[in-house]
Every structure is written in structure tokens, then in C-alpha cells.
Image (spheres, rainbow, N blue to C red):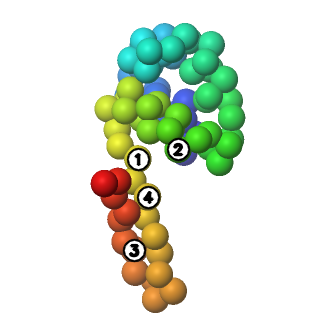
Amino acid sequence: MRLVELRERAGLTQAEVAARMGTAQPNVSRLECLPVREVSQRQLRRYLSALGADLVLVATTSAGDEIALTAP
């Protein structure tokens, strides 16, 4: 799912997300235009936090087990 879709699902505008992130709306627009793989983990965490969401990393073992990795 793209970042813009997550924001729209949260019912927020770019300006509202920017205010919550403490940045300007054009910065949110640029962030949403980037492929997710080019967004830093720090930026992604800030963006998701503004949406009321958390970033969860999941490791998959060779046996197919999924392990959620949490921040300290």
C-alpha cells in the first residue's frame, strides 16, 4: 500500500499530517511521491506516527515463521 493511501484511509490531509510531523505540507507531498524503499526508517516512523500508526518490522525465517521485531 502506498503512503498516500494510508493517509487517505486515516482521513487526513497532507497539511494535517505536516502539522502533526512539525514540517511543511510540501515535504509530506515529496515524501508520499517517493517509493517506500527510498524513505528512511526515521521518516517513515514520523509519518506513520502522525497517522496514529506504528511501524512493525517482521522477520521471516527459512521455516516460514514470522517474528515481529520491536524497537527497544
Disc 1 target residue: 55
Q: CA distance from mark 1 to mark 4?
A: 7 Å
**Horizontal side of residue 14 vs 56, given as left or right:** right
- Amino acid carrying mark 3 in the image: Glu
Rendered-image quadrant of the C terminus: bottom left
Q: CA distance from mark 3 to mark 2?
A: 20 Å
Q: CA distance from mark 1 to mark 3?
A: 16 Å
Disc 2 target residue: 41
Is any atom of residue 13 visible in this view? no
Q: CA distance from mark 3 to mark 4?
A: 10 Å
Which residue does the image show at 65% across and 48% down from the upper left?
Answer: 37
Q: Nearer the viewer, mark 2 or mark 1?
A: 2
Q: Position of residue 43 (x, y in %)?
A: 53, 34
Q: Nearer the viewer, mark 3 or mark 4?
A: 4
- Amino acid carrying mark 2 in the image: Gln
Q: CA distance from mark 2 to mark 1?
A: 9 Å
- Mark 2 / mark 1, whichever is N-terminal: 2
Q: Quadrant of residue 17?
A: top left
Disc 4 target residue: 57
Asked if 20 appears above or below 6 in the picture, the reply is: above
**Horizontal side of residue 20 vs 4, given as left or right:** left
